[in-house]
Amino acid sequence: MAELTRALIDAGALAAAASRPDCGAVLAFVGTTRNHHDGRAVVRLEYEAYERMAVEALGCIEREACARFAIASCAIVHRLGEVPPAEASVAVVVAAAHRGPAFDACRWAMDELKRTAPIWKKERFADGGEEWVGGTPLA
């Protein structure tokens, strides 16, 4: 599952969907909005994406994770629009027979998402300011 959504991300439901009898590890990474950045109070993040291309990139990451690591499945969901503090911006859920490959694949998928997906983040600050967050140039 490679998906963009404007709704809340239910990581528990994603983990439940990934559960399989042949897998002893279901790992969920959930990235949430912090209420601060570089000493400034953050009131929300806003995400934008080149949606068609972003979904394609997430799908490629999922397939590559399954090919590269000893895992049974990988699902990535990224939120668009406004995301207030403590709410999930992104979830990566991996199922594998063992925890090692699950951890490795989950970290790789999240790092690859940040590196390659055309998704942009703007921070809105309590003082009224806003900034696009600098990222990694797209591969």
Image (cartoon, rainbow, N blue to C red):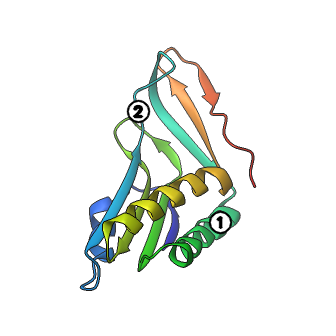
- Quarter in which the C terminus is drawn: bottom right
x then y, percent, for residue 26: 30, 68
Q: Is residue 44 left or right of residue 16?
A: right
Q: Is residue 114 left or right of residue 125?
A: right
Assess disc 1: are there few (<14), some (14-19) or many (≥20) residues with their C-alpha within 10 Å of its C-alpha: some
* Whether residue 96 is situated above or below residue 112 in the rendered picture: below
Residue at image point 53% right, 58% down: 108
Q: Toward the viewer: 48 or 133? A: 133
What type is the residue that disc 2 sits on? Answer: Arg
Residue that mark 1 sits on? 57
Residue at image point 54% right, 18% down: 128
x then y, percent, for residue 113: 59, 56
Q: Secondary structure at mark 2?
A: loop
* Whether residue 42 is situated above or below residue 14 in the rendered picture: above
Residue 63: name its quadrant: bottom right
x then y, percent, for residue 82: 49, 42
Q: CA distance from mark 1 to mark 2?
A: 25 Å
